Structure formats: structure tokens, C-alpha cells
Amino acid sequence: MPDTRTLDRSSPETRDRRAPRGLRGLPLAVWAAVAFFAATMTFWSIADPTYRSADEPDHVSAAIYWETYHSWPGFKEMPRMASVDASVKISGVRSTTKPVEQRPALSATEATPRPDRQSFSELGSGTDTLVNKAGQHPPGYSALLGTVADVLPATIPWDLEVWIFRMISVLLLTPLPLAAALIARRLGANRVVISAAALSVLAIPQLAVVGGAVNNDNLLNAAGAWIALGTVHVLTGDLRRRTALWVGLVSAVALLTKAWSLPLVAVVVLAYFVAAVRERSLRRVITPALIFVVAAMAGGWWWIHNVVVYGKVQPAGHFDPLKTGPLAMADTLHLMKDQFESVFPTRFWALLSIKSGALAYPTWIPAVLSVVLVAILLAGLALSSRLGVKRATVVVMVLPTLLTLAILLESVYSLTRKTGVAAGVQGRYLYSSIVPLLVVAVIGLAALLGLVSRGRARDDDQAGAARFTAARLVALLVGVFGVVYTVVSMGRAISWHFGEEHWSNPLDSLGDLAAWSPLPYALSVVVMIAFVVAALFALVAAAASVRATPARATPVPVDA
């Protein structure tokens, strides 16, 4: 009878002795997922018109501010750069005709010829009177972009410079499928589940949309994926000092990026506590835990500074308080309920920078997907032990998302009650811990498929063969869903953002996209072709995983 296990039940010590090192032995589907994710984000870098992604003008302005002044003012003290504000006016975010239309469809006839596109230095100098909201965050991401801007030619067209910033985000996020695969392998997953874990990153189109834009979320999300891998290493007995050091340094990067890093770091500390309980030895854990904390403080000092200067960990809010005083609890919850029901799921799954009253999909679609995801996650929590993963490990893996959601609810409630505006309801805030969440979802899906197949079998032999067959379908189902959802979403976005009018034929609108692209026409076409080729590669690799034998897992050894 074939091996029906989706996760290796042997001891960590036995697994570690036979495990491959580094990236050796990963399935083809992992690299196909990496290639398609990179190609998708690169396509979004030209398919999502400049400045239409959330807060992109703020982050570009912050990068130019760092390039110009090499400093970071305090909360509500950073002005916007005049050159960036000037570029917003010619970016197509708003129409230049009366009445002014927000986010109009962009046609080729309205695009500025590439030779005539000015640089930021030609568009203006100095600062504007507006406050840049990005100043409430640490400077890590803006310092990175500003340092790159320092070495770029002063004559580079402004939209091409923004595109280079976008590509830095693409480079940061490209390894996310790899991180998911390594987490699954560390947990003892077989090749099929490892493939599914990598392909699962494709299942949320908005993750790639944000990845193809200028947003400090991308540095945080990239760091969050590797912090999750380090957390799983600790939970599975890796108490080496060098592991503690690199996880601490990555945590420092996250802490210098955004406040949503705090739950991630707290969970790493919890992971060391869980490891101490499992090892029944505080002595083995205390040294690596201290190394982690000390390394993480290279970024953690920022939040101590905030408490000292502002009296709170994260000063936020750019709306004025209500003159009539705070809202009643019932009124506050009513405003929040509407936002979390109608806005949050869409912004998590596929907003696609489509606003102005339009939606990429009817609201019931992201709502149903959210319910399905929650159900699969609950299955992962309930059934993980059947697949060889301790339930406590799975709980710790999903805890960063739960903490982030709890903090988000409290923050939105506080700001809504104070200002009457239910702002900050962003599904993308969960992306900092999206990779371990998706791995748990894959475990849940694999467990559910195994249970359904066993229920239909008549005897033990048939049950074993059925579970074997079901397990092999996990990567195919996840991969096909991710690729199809991504391709359809790309088409929906192009049809709304480009053409003579909204919701034009996406194929007919590709010429308009190329005209507005910051890249030369030929290179824009190459990006489109690469997206198609990578999509086919991902589908073929997902299909090939059905024929792969779910061999026992080979996680990375402790002494690697």
C-alpha cells in the first residue's frame, strides 16, 4: 500500500539526519510559483497605474525626502515633496478636464510621449505644505528607496523612477513562495504539500498587486515571511545561536518598517517559551532567546522612542477629533461593521486599485472566499495532529494574524469613536503574517481531502489509496485556483484602468497600457509575455505534482 502520509511522523532527530541542506530537493512547483509570483508582480508594476495603489504618493514622497535631506522628522512633521505632488497631477490619478474624474480610464491618446516625460528634479524642488502620512512609520523602507534614488541619474523620468522603486518591492517579495515551501518542509511535509504551500501564495491576487507597488508593507511582508520560517525552526527544536541571530536581525528590519511587526516579534519570543517547555530545559533556550532579543533591539529602539516622546507605541491618525465629542459605542460599532463586512474582504483578496465606487468583483465573492479560508484554517488547527504537526505549533503559526486582527479592531474602534471616520480597515495589514497562515490552510485542505476520501472508501486498503490520491490533488487545486484567480484579476484591472472607458475589453486595452507604461513599448510587451509563460509554467508544474509520489518529508537539519 502506498505511503498515505502528507507529513512525516518520524522524530525530528531522525528527520534531521536524512534531511537535505539548503534549497536542494525542492519540487519544481516551488520554483514555478516563485517565477509566476515574480512575473505577476512585475506585470502589476505597469498594469497598476502609477500612484493608484494605496498610499503610493506618500511613500514615493518619503523616499525622495530621504534622498534630499537624509533625515526623518517626527510624527506629523514630514512635509510632502513638491516634485512628487507635481507628478501626481500628471499621473492620470485625476482627469485634467472638467468635471474632475477620480481614477479615469487611461487611453493611449492621453499618455505623455516618453521623450517628454520630466524628471522629479524638473518637476519641482523643496517641500509642500501638506503633511506626509508616511512620517508616522519608521524610516526603514523609505531609507532603502532613498538610498537607491541617490545613485539614479537626476534626469531619469519621474514615472521610471517610481517603477524602479516598485521593482525593489518585487525583489523583496519574490521569495515568498520559497519561504512558504521551506516552512512546510520544516514541518515535515511531503513534496506535494510543499508544492501546494508555495503555490498558495498565488491565491491572493491583492498580495501581488501590493508587491508591484511602492509601499512599506512590502519590506514588512518580506521580513514577516522569514520571521515565520525562523519561528517554525524554533518550534521544531532549532535552538542554534546563529538561527536566533538571523531571526533577530530580520526582526530588526521589520521593526524599522511598520508597527505591524510587533506581533511577529512577540510570537518569536513565545516560540522560545514553547521550545523551553518542550525541551524541559530553560538553560538550552535562554541563550538563543537573549541573542534574538538583543539583535531585534537594533530595530526595537524605535518603539521605545515613540513611548518616550509621544506617550504611545504607535502615534496615528490624521483626522481631527469630533467637535461634539466621541461617538457612542453603538454608533462606532455600526460604522465599523459596515467597513469590515463590505470593505475588508475585498481589500484582502482583490481590490486591484479599483475604487471610485467600482468593484473588481461583487462583494459576495471575497466574502465567500473568506468563509472558505476560515473553515480550512479551522480544519488545519483541528486536524494537524493527524498529519504529524503538533497543534501548539499550528496555533503559534496563526497567532500573529490573530494578534494583528485584534490590534486592528482596537485601533479602528478607537479612531472611529474619536473622529467618526472608520479609517484604516485594510485587509493588506494581514499580509505580514500571510505566509504561515497559508501553510496552515494547505495543511487543513490536505487533511480535509484525506478525510473525505477515506469516508468514501470501503476498506483500509482502499482508504489508503484514496488518501494517497487526494493528497496528490492539493497542489493542483491550489495552483489552478491561484493562477486562474490571478489571470482573471489582471484582466479585470486592465479593463477598468485602461481604454477609452472603464470596463473595456482587456485585450483591446493592452495598447493603452503600453502607452502609459514607464517602460519602453518593447520591454512592456516582454513583461506581458513573461506573465503568460510563467502562468503556463505554474499550471504545468501544479499538474505534474499529481504524478509525484508523496515521499516522506526531508526538512532542513538543525546543524545546516
Image (cartoon, rainbow, N blue to C red):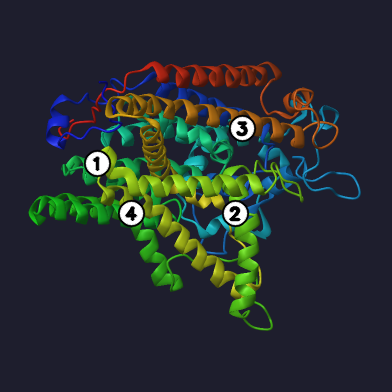
Residue 550 on image: x %, y %: 31, 23
Which one is nearer the viewer's eye here, 180 or 116? 180
Q: Which residue is mark 4?
A: 265
According to the picture, the residue beneath numbered tag 3 turns out to be 45
The mark that comes first in sequence, 4 or 2, is: 4
Mark found first going from the N terminus, 4 or 1: 1
Q: Give the position of the C terminus as an image quadrant.
A: top left
* CA distance for labels 3 and 4: 30 Å
For the point 22% across and 45% down, which residue is it? 234
Of the residues tagged 2 and 3, which is closer to the observer?
Answer: 2
Which residue is the extreme one toward the front?
458
**Looking at the image, which residue is at 38% across and 24% down?**
469
Q: Three-letter amino acid code at disc 2? A: Phe
- The percent position of residue 465, horizontal first and vertical second, equals 33, 24
Circle 2 SS class? helix
Q: Are marks 2 and 1 in contact (CB under 8 Å)?
A: no
Query: Within 10 angstroms of label 1, few (less than 14), some, or many (20 or more) residues?
Result: many
Nearer-the-camera pick, 346 or 175: 346
Residue type highlighted by circle 1 = His
Q: Nearer the viewer, mark 2 or mark 1?
A: 2
**Label 2, label 1: how many angstroms apart (C-alpha)?**
32 Å
| Circle 2 residue | 344
**Which residue does the numbered mark 1 point to in the structure image?**
233
Query: Relative to 294, does residue 354 appear above or below in the rendering?
Result: above
Kind of residue sitting beneath label 4: Val
256 up-or-down from 226: above or below: below
